[in-house]
Image: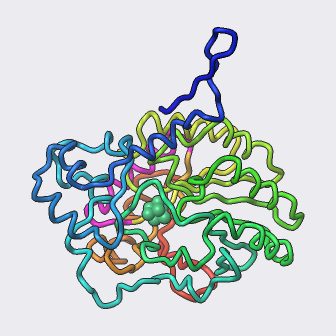
Amino acid sequence: METSTVRTNGSITLQPSMVREVWKQELADAVRDPAELCDLLDLDPAIAQKSKDAGRDFMFLVPRGFISRMQPGDPNDPLLLQVLPRLEELDDIPGFVSDPVGEQPARRGTGLIQKYHGRCLLLVTGGCAVHCRYCFRREFPYAESGASPASFVAAVNEIRADESIHEVILSGGDPLLIDDALLETLIRDIDSISHVRRLRIHTRIPVVLPSRITEQLLHILDTTRLTACVVIHANHAAELDSIVAGSIRRMSHVVRILLNQAVLLRGVNDTAESLIQLSERLLDIGVTPYYLHLLDPVRGASDFDVPEEIGVRLIEELRNRLSGYAVPRLAREHPGSPSKTWLA
Ligand code: SF4
């Protein structure tokens, strides 16, 4: 960690404002080269070379804490498969497109997307702490969509002017990637809009960079008038180690609703056993399984696709083996539809 010291009367004082926070340092130290990842996991260097070629359009990025949960020597590790570029990404498969859920027509002013009645989504940043190869926004034009703090004032004004909006969803990228100070200002501004009742945060950061759950962040969420709901994103039980569990536990003291959404991914979690373990682990750490999404058909992710009928069968099996509240809803998003479609 970067630190800065100042001498006062012979003693050394740490200057808090000049200390780089742990999570920022961990993000700066994240692995950005598939060769380094393969080296860390004792994998064949040939895998890294193919991966380098495949990842040229969507940069490779993985925090070391997430890598530490992968099994060395296993090229099929379910966490590794989510982040390592594969040559199949370069295949042009019919039906797999750049905007699979129709977000471009739903853009509403700067940084806002509104697809459903009563809530709108604010794109806080285009950055993430990890790059998931199946991401439906992997080609999203963040720069021209106002996904940055520079757009917050206009976005908040637009929300203020529309009394039909009761819930604001912070999304991205990953909304927890911005500074606490910026986030606090944004949340306070949303808080001041009387017709907004709930704040929902969609984030993968508690899972991939748990050190980001700082005391300051918890204070911000604890002191808002808004009902805070955090939807994390984990696809496999192995993602949820004891450090993640600790951060989730601390969040559960200030967040009223804690949910998980997962994506059904071929080779990662497309067995009943894997999904059962995910649900059990989520409940152990205090998170309710909410959605299991079928893959959005984004260009470059076709090799993760699992057919709908298999998804339905998996959910039936989960229903036979788990309590009702442990079974996520299987859902698919259709562009232009007024809601998600529940399939099981
Ligand atoms: S963290 Fe979320 S937005 Fe970022 S790459 Fe992964 S799935 Fe996409």
| 97 relative to 15 in the view: left or right | left
Estimate the x, y position of residue 317 in percent, counting from the top left.
37, 61
Q: What residue is at 45 percent from the left and 46 percent from the top?
A: 27
**In the displayed structure, would residue 177 be above or below residue 122?**
above
Estimate the x, y position of residue 303 in percent, counting from the top left.
26, 73
Residue 82 lies in quadrant: bottom left
| Magenta stretch contains residue 184 | no
Q: What residue is at 42 percent from the left and 65 percent from the top?
A: 263
Q: Between 323 and 31, which is closer to the camera in this rendering?
A: 31
Q: Between 223 and 273, which is closer to the camera in this rendering?
A: 223
Q: How many marks?
A: 0
Q: Is residue 73 visible?
A: yes
Q: What residue is at 48 percent from the left and 58 percent from the top?
A: 128
Magenta-drawn segment: 264-286
Estimate the x, y position of residue 121 in percent, counting from the top left.
66, 71
| 153 relative to 330 in the view: left or right | right
Residue 12 lies in quadrant: top right
Q: Is residue 324 visible?
A: no
Residue 275 lies in quadrant: bottom left
View extreme (top): residue: 10
